[in-house]
Structure formats: C-alpha cells, structure tokens
Image (cartoon, helix red, strand yellow):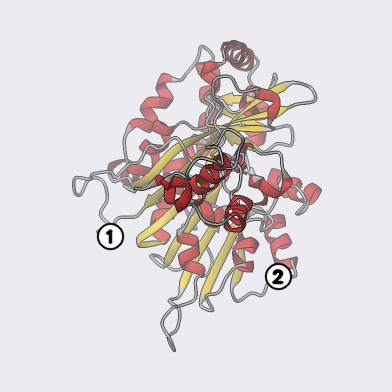
C-alpha cells in the first residue's frame, strides 16, 4: 500500500514542505514537492484530518461517551495495569479473587453468617408460602423498585427474532410466544412489548405473587392480547403449566433473577416445568445472582438458611449460584446433590430439619422418583460469569458484583438425559457484556 496517498500522509508531507527547513527557493524543486497538490487542497486535507480520540468506554466527554451510544454497549472497560480504579464508576470483568483484602473480608463474613444461622422456627416461617413475602414486597414497592430492563434484546438476540415483523411482503409474522417467569411488576415484559413489531406476539407474564400480577394488569400498557398476566408458581408440582399456556407451545422462557428465589429442593421441579412448556428448540434466557456477589457478602447475622441461601430483611429468599452448579442443574447432570453435600457445614444437623420443611411445605412439592431417573437435559448454548467492579469515587469504596448469565435450549429430539447420550455445546465465555 502506498502510504503517501492517504489524506494524513499528504497533509504531513505538505506541511513539511512549507517549513523554513525545506529546500531553498533558489534550488530546483524536488520530484516529491512537484507531485504535491496546490496549497488550497493541502489546507482542505489538513482541515479534515481528525486527531486521535479517546475510546468511548474511557471518555468523560458527553459527546464521545459510551452512555450516549445506541444501543448501549457493555463489557468493554477493562481494568489494566496503571489505571486509576477511581477514575470511572465501574470496571468490567474484574475478578474479586485478585483482591486479597476483599477475599479475607469475604471469608470472615461467610464464617459469621454460618455461625449465626436462621433459627428452625424462622426457617419454617420464611419457607412456608414464600409468595406472601413477595406480596408484601410489591405492596410496599409497587413498580418503582426495579428499573426497566431495556438491555434484554442486546443480551438475548432471540427476543429480537420474536418481536420482529416478517420481512416477506404480504406475509404474516410467525406467532411467537414468550413466557416470563417471575414477571414482578412488568419491568421486563413491558419494555419488550414497547419495541414489538410482531402482530402475533404473545407474552405470558407469570408470577406467584398475586400483588405483582395485579400491578401488571393495572399498567396502562396492558392490553390482555399481546400480554397476559397470570398467577403461577414455577416450582409447583400440581399446576405444572401456567394458565392459558399449552405444553410445548413456548418459544422463549425468560428467567431474570427468579431462579434464586427458589429453595434448592425446588430446582428439579422448576426445570421440569420449564421443559414442559417449551417447544423443541425453544430457549431459556437466564440471568441471576452469582457466588461472591456483594449482596451475599453483606448479609449479617440471622440471614443464613443454608449454604449460599439467605433470607433478606423483607422476608424474601435468595440463592447465589456458580457456573458448574447451574450447568449440572440445566444439563440433567447429577452434580447438584453432590455439590450440596460438599458444601454442608458443622451446623448441617440443625439445618436438615429446615431443608425438609422447605421441600414438604411449599405447595405440597415433593421429589418425583421419575425426576431423579430422567432429569430434563437442556443443551447449554452459553453460560458464563459477569464480574463487575463498581466504585464509589467520593467515598473511595470498591464493590464487587457477580451475576450468572446463560442460554439453555430444549433439544429438537425432546429426549431426556437417560434416553440418549448428550453432547453439550458450551461456551464458557466469561466476557459476558451485561448490566442490570
């Protein structure tokens, strides 16, 4: 490539040729000088040569800032050697294990939590009809607690496919069915509906909180046609299908910070229910709390139900996952129970009664023998960890957040794990570009 033909090279050559150090006027002009364009053209070229700009993810200039991009881009600000941690409010993909002080603090907190576990009486109180605690939550917070999740299409492109109008002339869009489980006040469903171009889209927004469903139905954007809100418990062993939803009819199941609200004893039934509603080839879009998240580390005395499972101050429950645990749960592996056994502490004998209460008291759920023999085997399309370092620049504080994100697909064969060998197509990409 002839570099002298570029505008930048021409501008540099032109400016150099008109400096005092150039060839004296009495000397004949060089061949290079003769080849240069007239001065007016040189000035025009120089005027259009832009100086190097700061990358948008590191810029403080509002006109060149990542926050102004459309669509918003996540996950591109890496903390590198020599960077000032407190220059920006957040850094992507920062592993907290590299911070020795935070690791020490985390270990101390976990020890304190286990030592001061929830009493057996309180465990039964919180694990019996957990939906009533969410009813209280939404009565107090209505729809002003969670932000609208407008980033979903970027993180889960399958949603764009479901909401896109057919590109073929004079043709109807394919009917698309989305089931959101744990829909809350509609902070996920309504943003999807707002950008919908598919006249045949139906969103089933389900939650086991009656108050949450009421809030969705009272929303001005609720039409009862493209979005339908119903009360349904994801982990129910008696009502395994949501109202108005047929088995094998759903294209996408959205599970955004809902699986963590279940006790470990409810996971198997919940996965089976999701399997039942999905059509072959349908997908689960999953995002939830990760092990070591600041929300877990911050728990004080009297909040620890069992390993990585807690009750918040408002009575709602939350679990914190790791990658291998989720892989075992959704791929039909047998590592779930084994991993739970490895995580027991010295207080296990006391917590055994709590765990049994959870399994037996929640809507009559019980473990089906067939569930253990033939667990659903989703293909793991992608599964990874989203680490973010949030910074309070005024107080000089560092806050480590951790979320799990994945896509699980129901195989086209619809076969269970025990019926045929399965090969997972996994992408353990830790560079997930996400934000809540």
- As helix, strand or loop, the secondary structure at mark 2 comes to loop
- Give the residue drawn at x 63%, y 19%: 117
Q: Residue at x 59, y 59 (%)?
A: 206
Which of pointers 1 and 2 lies earlier in the amino acid sequence? 2
Q: Residues within 10 Å of mark 2 (few under 14, many from 20)?
A: few
Residue sitting farthest toward the left: 420
Tell me the residue that label 2 is attached to: 221
Task: Where is residue 194? Give x, y as percent.
Answer: 64, 67
Write the residue at 50% across / 64% down.
Answer: 160
Quadrant in the picture for the C terminus:
top right
Q: Which residue is mark 1?
A: 412
89 left or right, relative to 10: right
Relative placement, left or right, of 35 versus 51 is: left
User: In the figure, residue 425 lies in which quadrant?
Assistant: top left
Q: Residue at x 48, y 40 (%)?
A: 432
The residue closer to the viewer here, 270 or 408, is: 408
> Number of callouts in the render?
2
Q: Position of residue 258 (x, y in %)?
A: 57, 46
- Where residue 207 sits, quadrant-wise, is bottom right
Rounded to the nearest whole Å, what is the CA distance between mark 1 and mark 2? Answer: 35 Å
Vertical order, 117 against 373 (above or below): above
Please indicate, yes or no, whether residue 218 appears anywhere in the rendered image.
Answer: yes
């Amino acid at each position: 490539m002839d570099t002298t033909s570029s505008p930048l090279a021409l501008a540099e050559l032109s400016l150099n040729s008109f400096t005092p150090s150039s060839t004296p006027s009495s000397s004949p002009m060089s061949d290079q000088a003769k080849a240069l364009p007239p001065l007016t053209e040189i000035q025009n070229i120089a005027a259009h040569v832009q100086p190097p700009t700061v990358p948008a993810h590191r810029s403080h200039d509002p006109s060149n800032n990542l926050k102004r991009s459309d669509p918003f881009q996540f996950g591109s600000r890496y903390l590198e050697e020599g960077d000032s941690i407190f220059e920006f409010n957040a850094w992507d993909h920062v592993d907290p294990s590299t911070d020795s002080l935070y690791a020490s603090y985390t270990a101390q907190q976990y020890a304190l939590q286990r030592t001061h576990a929830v009493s057996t009486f309180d465990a039964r109180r919180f694990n019996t009809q957990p939906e009533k605690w969410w009813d209280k939550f939404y009565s107090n917070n209505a729809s002003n607690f969670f932000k609208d999740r407008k980033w979903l299409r970027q993180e889960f492109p399958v949603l764009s496919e479901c909401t896109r109008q057919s590109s073929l002339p004079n043709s109807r869009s394919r009917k698309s069915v989305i089931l959101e489980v744990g829909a809350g006040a509609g902070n996920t469903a309504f943003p999807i509906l707002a950008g919908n171009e598919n006249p045949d889209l139906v969103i089933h927004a389900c939650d086991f909180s009656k108050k949450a469903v009421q809030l969705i139905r009272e929303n001005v954007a609720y039409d009862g046609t493209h979005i339908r809100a119903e009360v349904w418990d994801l982990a129910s062993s008696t009502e395994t299908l949501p109202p108005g939803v047929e088995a094998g009819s759903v294209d996408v199941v959205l599970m955004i910070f809902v699986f963590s609200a279940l006790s470990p004893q409810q996971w198997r039934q919940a996965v089976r229910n999701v399997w039942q509603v999905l059509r072959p080839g349908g997908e689960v879009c999953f995002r939830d709390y990760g092990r070591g998240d600041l929300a877990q580390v911050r728990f004080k005395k009297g909040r620890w139900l069992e390993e990585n499972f807690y009750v918040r101050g408002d009575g709602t429950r939350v679990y914190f996952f790791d990658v291998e645990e989720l892989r075992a749960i959704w791929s039909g592996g047998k590592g779930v129970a084994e991993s739970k056994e490895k995580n027991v502490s010295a207080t296990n004998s006391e917590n055994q009664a709590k765990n049994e209460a959870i399994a037996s008291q929640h809507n009559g759920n019980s473990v089906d023998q067939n569930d253990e023999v033939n667990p659903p085997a989703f293909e793991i399309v992608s599964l990874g960890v989203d680490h973010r370092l949030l910074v309070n620049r005024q107080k000089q504080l560092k806050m480590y957040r951790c979320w799990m994100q994945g896509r699980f697909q129901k195989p086209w064969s619809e076969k269970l794990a025990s019926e045929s060998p399965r090969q997972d197509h996994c992408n353990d990409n830790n560079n997930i570009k996400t934000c809540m």
